[in-house]
Image (cartoon, rainbow, N blue to C red):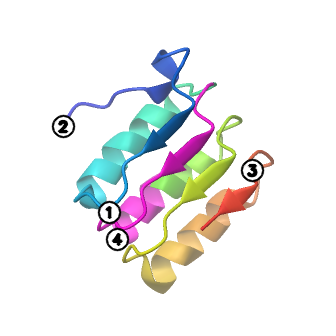
Amino acid sequence: MTPVSPGASSTLLRLKHRYNRLCDEGATVLAAGLRKGNTVLRELDVAGSWIGVTGAEALAECLKRNPALHALDLAKNMLGDLGAAALAEGLKGNTALRELD
């Protein structure tokens, strides 16, 4: 998979990829795109997308530096305690995110 930047589009405000087999690999690619200067995407919904600890860690890393994302839906994934801890760490410096499920 090649990283793509959701920030590359000036009109993509909401991305819903619910209940697809995104898995850790897809979440990692998506996170790489978000780290590449996303200034537009406001909502990311990847509920039920088979994301585990590795994907959660990748998303947590992009949360540390993402000024645009206001809502992130990770419900019904397989994050476990380690994934939740990674997300908590990623949110420490994030002032933009308002909704996390």
Residue 21 location, quadrant: bottom left
Residue 76 vs residue 66: left or right? Answer: left
Instruction: Pick whichever, 101 or 81, lies toward us.
Output: 101
Chain part drawn in magenta: 40-58
The mark closer to the camera, 4 or 1, is: 1
Q: Look at the numbered discs 1 and 2 and tell me whether their residues touch, using CB distance below 8 Å.
A: no
Residue 89 vs residue 93: left or right? Answer: left
- The residue where tag 1 is placed is 49
- The residue where tag 4 is placed is 52
- Of the two numbered discs 4 and 2 on the same chain, state the one appearing first in sequence: 2
The Cα–Cα distance between marks 1 and 2, rounded to whole angstroms, is 16 Å
Kind of residue at disc 4:
Gly
Percent coordinates x, y for residue 66 in the rendering: 65, 39
Residue 22 location, quadrant: bottom left
The Cα–Cα distance between marks 4 and 1, rounded to whole angstroms, is 9 Å
Kind of residue at disc 3:
Asn
Q: What is the number of the mark on residue 94? A: 3
Q: Residue extending furthest right? A: 95
- Of the two numbered discs 1 and 2 on the same chain, state the one appearing first in sequence: 2
- Numbered disc 1: secondary structure: loop
Q: Look at the numbered discs 4 and 2 and tell me whether their residues touch, using CB distance below 8 Å.
A: no
Q: Is residue 96 magenta?
A: no
